[in-house]
Amino acid sequence: MGIITVLWEKWTEFKRDFYKITVSAMISPLMYLIIFGLGIQTTSHGEPYLHFLIPGIVAMATMTGSFSAIAQNMSVQRLYEKALDQVMVSPTPLWQFITGQILGGSLRGMYAAGIILLLTRAIRTDLIFNGWSFLIMFLNGTVFSTIALVLSFLAKSYTDAPRYTSYIIMPMSFLCNTFFSTDQMPGGFRQVVSCLPLSQASGMIRAISNGESPGVFGFVILLIYLAVFTALSVLFIYRKKNL
């Protein structure tokens, strides 16, 4: 019941800010598609660059949509509205509250990715997006929802959330196999970037879009991130309750 309550809160917020959420989810990816995809006519791995770019932007949309849905709101609710304190004294199981937040953030990321897929339908490509693609999008969204949840618990003020976006989300947006392949990076740095969740999500979605198998390594990496940051979220919230 607690999970449904949190998801209903996210749904109410989504309906209230529908136009703002939709426009913000469209602007940056659309600019990237126009500037990098259509403005710069080039190839990547022997294919039109758009074939490389679109899966990366779809993966990036799940990251930014999920992260932004949790980080800012949760920081404000915890620090100023004291909503987290109210949850702790309520009969709602805390694990259900955390699960609801993660699922709600991931669904917001899926919505952002869906917008990109609709926008790119006008571009004639042979890219494939199937059930596995959407599973990866959802899993990537849950990872960044948990990351946002942990960072919102660590935030000292509501201004920390934009800083986290600058420190974490922005670098990953450009480095993690979205606009160019990590194969072109120097050794050592390449291995580190390749193990980041967005790199794995982009690579798997791109493999599927080209009719290839995504493999299992990327799923394992994403599940590890999900388990680690979920455990950190649970640890933080239960320690705070027991103070």
Image (cartoon, rainbow, N blue to C red):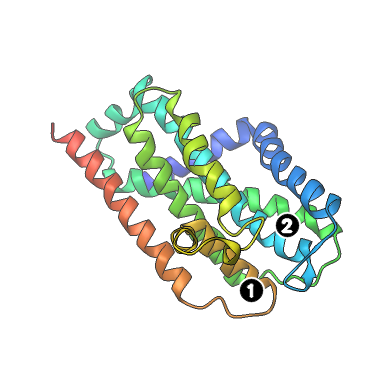
Task: Give the camera-side residue of 166 and 150.
Answer: 166
Q: Circle 1 — which element?
A: helix
Which residue is at 64% across, 74% downward? 208
Instruction: Please identify the residue farthest to the top as the structure is shown.
Output: 80
Location of residue 116 in the rendering, given as x and y in whole percent from the top left corner? 72, 52
Query: Quarter-wise, where is residue 159 in the image?
Result: top left
Q: Residues within 10 Å of mark 1 (few under 14, many from 20)?
A: many
Q: Where residue 199 sits: x, y (%)?
A: 53, 60
At x 62% / y 63%, what residue is drawn? Answer: 181
- The disc labelled 2 sits on which kind of residue? Leu
Q: Residue at x 35, y 41 (%)?
A: 150
Point out which mark residue 135 bears: none
Kindly tell me whether residue 9 is visible in this rendering. Answer: no
**Circle 1 is placed at which residue position?**
208
Question: On the rendered structure, is 60 left or right of 195?
Answer: right
Residue 108, horizontal then vertical, whole percent: 56, 46
Quarter of the view holding residue 16: top right
Image location of residue 161, percent across then percent down = 46, 31
Per the image, the residue denoted by label 2 is: 117
- Identify the residue at horizontal 70%, vertical 75% (top origin): 210
Which type of secondary structure does the marked residue at label 2 adopt?
helix
Q: Quadrant of the C terminus?
A: top left
Compare marks 2 and 1 and give the one earlier in the sequence.
2
| Residue 168 visible | yes
Which is more foreground, mark 2 or mark 1?
Answer: 1
